[in-house]
Image (spheres, grey):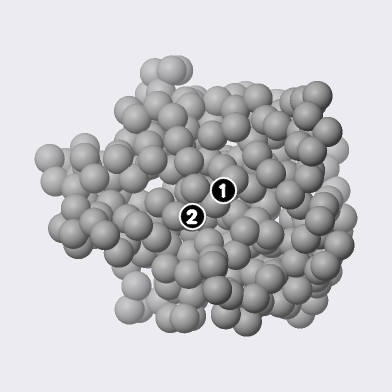
Amino acid sequence: MATHGSRDQVDRHGTTQYLQAMQASTPELSPRYSTITTAKYQPNPTTAMSTIAFFGATGDSAGHCLAQTLTSGINCRALARNPSKLTASLLAKSVPSSTLDRHLTIIRGDAKDLEAVKRVLRTDDDEKATVVDKIVSGIGGTQLVFTWNPFRPFSLSDPKICQEAGATLLRALQELRPATKPMLINISTTGIPPKGVPRDVPWPYVVLYPWLGHVMHEDKRVLQGRLAEHMTVSPEGERGIRGYVNVKPSILMSGEAKGMQAVRQGVDEKPEVGYWINRVDVGGWIAESLVKSDGKAEWRNKSVTLTY
């Protein structure tokens, strides 16, 4: 899939020599996912699957999902402030350079830039906008900031990144007014369950999370609330999405894939409680359960917890 355009809008993946050199030094995909990532995607005849948009794919949960989506032969569009960093990350996940050229378009920009977000979402230039079928958002703060507050020692350089980027995404879709609205897959976190449902973390985390992760969790909590409000309060004609699923993994680690059979999944009313899960398995689960299929009806406009 060609990625033509001015450099401030669409960035090429890099020179062929750069891609080949990076790929040559990259290990093969984990055998636990080899059958998933090498299988050609077969569209569901009842679903008009076309293109998937990715935000925050430089982060590894969304990044692993993007890698497995691409190697399944699905066209993807991704927003990145640094396209070469995203390209290098995908090559490190053993995505062939030929697959990047054929199936990936990277748009340079920021998730809070309305026009950049619109460019990612649109798949044509028709007056009646055609947009992607699904959106995967792995946006989250990455730069920790130490504070002198002993009760909340850590913050973020951009403590409202999730809620502001989410608001920009919804606004972009409302202004585009697509004939077919996309589904949003929002990668969130455990530790912020809705009121009235069981806790979704082990007891030690009940103490640890508010102390170490209050700012990060509050940002994600606000976004989850806005998504719920968007689907319940906004008139149907004014909604930018047809629905959403919050994917809420337990603490993320960077180990090797254990495979789909190792992943336990729950819902808000009956969450699976665990201590950790590897990012590669989160990305793999999203690709298989929500990108390449429509997921379970009980997940629509709710949350799914993932853990080992």
Marks 2/1: CA–CA distance = 6 Å
Corner quadrant of residue 183: bottom left
Q: Residues within 10 Å of mark 2 (few under 14, many from 20)?
A: many
Measured from the top left, where is residue 164 in percent x and y?
Answer: 45, 35
The residue that label 2 is drawn on is 224
Measured from the top left, where is residue 41 in percent x and y?
Answer: 52, 68
Residue at left 60%, top 65%?
193
Q: Secondary structure at mark 1?
A: helix
Relative to 93, say whether 68 is above or below: below
Could you tell me how many numbered marks the image carries?
2
Q: Quadrant of the N terminus?
A: top left
The residue that label 1 is drawn on is 220
Are the residues tagged 2 and 1 within 8 Å (C-beta)? yes
Image-based side of 233 in relation to 158, left or right:
left
Relative to 169, say whether 107 is above or below: above
Measured from the top left, where is residue 81 in percent x and y?
Answer: 55, 25
